Image (cartoon, grey):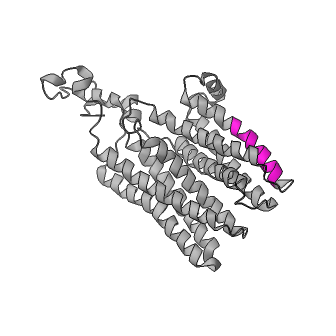
Amino acid sequence: MHPAYSVIFFTCASGAGYGLLGLLGLLGALGILPADRWFGLTGFLVGLIAVTAGLLSSTYHLGRPERAWRAFSQWRSSWLSREGVLAVATYVPAGLTALGWVIFQEIWWLPALFLALLTLATVTATAMIYASLKTIRRWNNGWTLPGYLSMGLASGALWLAFLNCLFDATSITVDFVALLALAAAATLKIGYWRFVDTELGAATAGSATGLGRFGRVRLFTAPHTEENYLLQEMGYKVARKHALKLRRIAWLAGFGGPFLALLMALSLPSAAVPLLLLALAANAIGTVTERWLFFAEARHVVTLYYGAEAA
């Protein structure tokens, strides 16, 4: 699939934003985070700005962005519509939780828990937009949903660890949550890559034509002599050697580097802030790289019509 930069930014920014907001709600309701006005204000500002910027950028992928509001009406059947409804609904408990945290310096546990649940539901809906597409096997599998959830949690937990250090909140639980989230995301991503490398594809030219029982089916002649829209959008290809290099960058920058930086920050408190800033920058680079690969390595079944052996 052709990687759309607006969608890449949307999934990365909103994932990190919802991860941060969800952790603020959950850990705040559990009494792990301090009800400090400036800590809460900064956390909610970062989270809400990331979420809002991501949601706005997603509309630029539409042919008619001004009609994006119509997507809300299809919530019964469309994961895209459900995502929109949940994303808007999340602003309500986020606003209430922020109100108590910033104005009254109290963490109201009920809206905080609703905030955590709605952020989880929203990221789940985002992941299911892709996981529900049976025409793209590399998305339509059991790795997509946990991958989206773990990467959003890892990015959000890193931001929370940075804020925890910046405001001297000194909650060791936050750092352990970030370490666990990074480890989970790194493990799931390796599992996903192994799956896409070994999975042969649910559809082949033989299964698509019904002629597979007679032997191997291959393209006799190209359907046309030049590229068209389908080949540009659905048949995007990335060289294997480049994909492996980008995977290493995504894994090391997105997970491995931040994990080590966080461990160093725990053992060197005086250098914790710059170390965590480096971890945030590296995680952003790694997440964008991974998300670009997520789209670039996907194969749509329409490519069987143009000579692909499997999809």
Q: Magenta region: which residues?
A: 89-101
Relative to 76, does residue 248 appear above or below in the rendering?
A: below
Quarter occupied by the C terminus:
top left
Quarter occupied by the N terminus:
top left
Residue 225 visible within the image = no
Report if residue 93 lies within the magenta region: yes
Report if residue 98 lies within the magenta region: yes
Residue plotted at (21% across, 26% down) = 206
Residue 110 visible within the image = yes
Would residue 198 be found to the left or right of residue 158 on screen? left
Image x and y of residue 3, in percent:
45, 42
Image x and y of residue 218, in percent:
18, 29
Residue that sits furthest to the top in the current view: 210
Relative to 137, does residue 41 appear above or below in the rendering?
A: below
Identify which residue, 276 or 308, lies in the foreground.
Answer: 276
Image x and y of residue 245, in percent:
36, 58
Image x and y of residue 201, in percent:
29, 36
Residue plotted at (69% across, 53% down) = 24
Q: What secondary structure characterizes most of the magenta part?
A: helix
Find residue 141 and report its image quarter. Answer: top left
